[in-house]
Amino acid sequence: MHNSEAIWRHVEEHAAALVALSDRVWEMPELNFQEVRSAAEHTAMLRAQGFRVTEGIGGIPTAMMGEAGEGGPVIAILGEYDALPGLSQEAGVAEHRPRPGEGAGHGCGHNLLGAGALLAATAVKDWLAAEGRPGRVRYYGCPAEEGGAAKTFMVRDGVFSDVDVAITWHPGPFVSIWEPVSLAIQLLDFTFAGKASHAAAAPHLGRSALDAVELMNVGVNYLREHMPSDARVHYAYLDAGGIAPNVVQAGATVRYLVRAADLPGLLDLAARVEKIARGAALMTETQVASRVVSAMSNLLANPPLEQALHANLTRLGPPPFDAEDRAFAEAIRATLTREDIVSAHRRFGVPVTDAPLCDTIVPLGAKGERMMGSTDVGDVSWAVPTVQARGATYAIGTPGHSWQMTAQGKTPAAHKGMIHVAKAMAGTAVDVLRDPDLLARAKADHAERLARTPYVSPLPAGLAPPLDMAG
C-alpha cells in the first residue's frame, strides 16, 4: 500500500466538517480585509482540530496561523476566504438570481480554497501524530487576495521566514498544476486637486480635477500601443468629483491596476503611468498625488514540488463526479457561450471535448494560451519554495468572477473537487516530510532562481496593509 493512501484516509475523516466550513463561509461573503466572520470560523476550526493558533499575523486582523507538530521541516498550507463585490447569487441555481443583501458573493471559490487547504493541513497534523515523526504543518489563513495582497505584506513582515515549503490551490475547471506564471501588479490611486468654480458664470476661474483624470486616462490609452504585449493596465473612478455638472470639480480620484510579466517590468510601466498623471496635472493646472495601495510579484516556479504534486494528482485520478453533478454542470453551461467553453480548454492546453466536468488530469507542462492574472501567492513563491494545484470544482467554461461561479460554490461537485485536491496537497506535504532529498531539491532550485534574480518587495517601505480598501 502506498503511503499516500494513509494520508487520504485522514482527509476523508475530516471532510464533512471542512465541507460544512466551506458552506458557512459561502453564506457570509466578505470583502478584502473585512473577513471578520470568515476568519473567526477558520480560527474556531483550527482550535477545534487542536492547532496552536496565532491571530492577527502580519498586523492584519483577519489573518491567522495554526501550527501542529514539533521540530523537523515546516510545511505551510495556504488558504483564502475573501469574496467579491457584485456577485451575489443563490446556490445551486442555473439562472442569475442574486440574493438579498449587500451584493457580495464567492465568485472565485475562496470559500472552497480556505476550507480545502485547512482540510489538507488537518490531515497532515493527524498523520504526523500517528507516525510520531518530527515536522510541523501550518495553516495560514490569508485574507484579501482579491487586490488587497495580504500575502505580500505578510512576506514583507517575515511571516514565512522559517517555512520550508508552501502548498496551496485554487478552484478551476480542470485538475492540474498551476503553471507558475502570473503578472506582477501594483494598485495605485491618483488624486487630483483643482479649484471649484461656477461652470457657467466663471468657468475660467476653475481648474477641473475631473478633466485631469480624463486626460490621464486618454494618455494611458495611448500608452497601450507602446507596452509589452503581456502587460495590462486597468482603471476605475473612485471619485469623479461630484454629481453637479454646473460646478467645476475640485477633486477627483482614479485607481489604476498596472500589470507586467515580472517585477522590473512592472516598476518601469508604473513609472510611465506616473509620468502621464503628472502630464495631465500640468495640462489642467491641477495638483496630483499618488499612492501605492498594494502590490504582488509574479510567480516563481519550483519543478521538484510541481512534479511531486502532479504525481499525487495522477495517483488519485480525476474527482469522482456522478451523473447528477454532470447534469447541473450542463445546466450552468447552457448559460455560457461556446467561446467560454472553448477558451477554458485552450487556457489549460487540453483538447476541446463535450465533457461538462473534468474527467482527466492535465499533463504536467501542458501549455495553454497565456491569459494571465495575478496572485499574491507570487510573493510567497519568492520567499519559500511554493507549489499550487488547480482543483476541479465547477463546470468547464465557467468564467471566473461570475454569478455562475458563485452558484456552484456549494454544490456536491464543488465539495468533491475540494476534497480531491486536499488529498493531493496533503500527500505532497507527506512526501516532503518523508523524503529529505525532495526537500533539498526544492530548496536548491529556489535558491538558484533567487541567485539569478533576488527578490525585492514591490511594496514601498513602511506601507501599511490597506485595511479600509473594501470601504
Image (tube, helix red, strand yellow):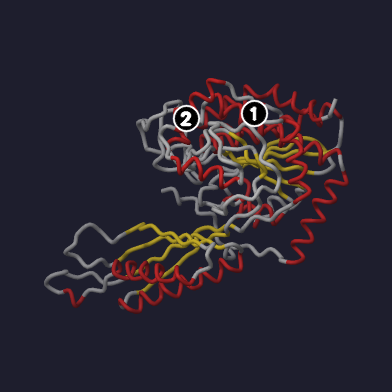
302 on left or right of 91: right
Relative to 20, is 437 above or below?
Answer: below
Disc 1 on helix, strand or loop?
loop
- Mark identifier at residue 158: none
- Splitting the image into 4 quarters, where does residue 418 fall? top right
Q: Give whichever of 341, 126 is nearer the camera.
A: 341
Relative horizontal placement of residue 381, taking residue 128 as reference (left or right): left
The x and y percentages for residue 419 are 65, 29
Q: Indicate whether 264 appears above or below 40.
A: below
Q: Position of residue 191 (x, y in %)?
A: 38, 66
Q: Are marks 2 and 1 in contact (CB under 8 Å)?
A: no
Q: Quadrant of residue 461?
A: bottom right
Q: Which residue is mark 2?
A: 27
On screen, residue 456 above or below 465: below
Q: Which residue appears at 43% of the width and 37% of the height? A: 336
Residue type indicated by callout 2: Glu
Q: Which residue is mark 1?
A: 319
Q: Secondary structure at mark 2?
A: loop
Q: Amino acid at mark 1?
A: Pro
The residue located at (19%, 65%) in the rendering is 247
What's the residue at 36%, 62% (across, down)?
253
Q: Is residue 58 left or right of residue 25?
A: right
Decide which of 437, 353 is in the foreground and name it.
Answer: 353
Q: Nearer the viewer, mark 2 or mark 1?
A: 1
Tell me which numbered mark, 2 or 1, is placed earlier along the sequence.
2
* Residue with the most extreme left position: 201
The quadrant where residue 202 appears: bottom left
Whole-number angstrom distance, CA of label 2 to CA of label 1? 24 Å
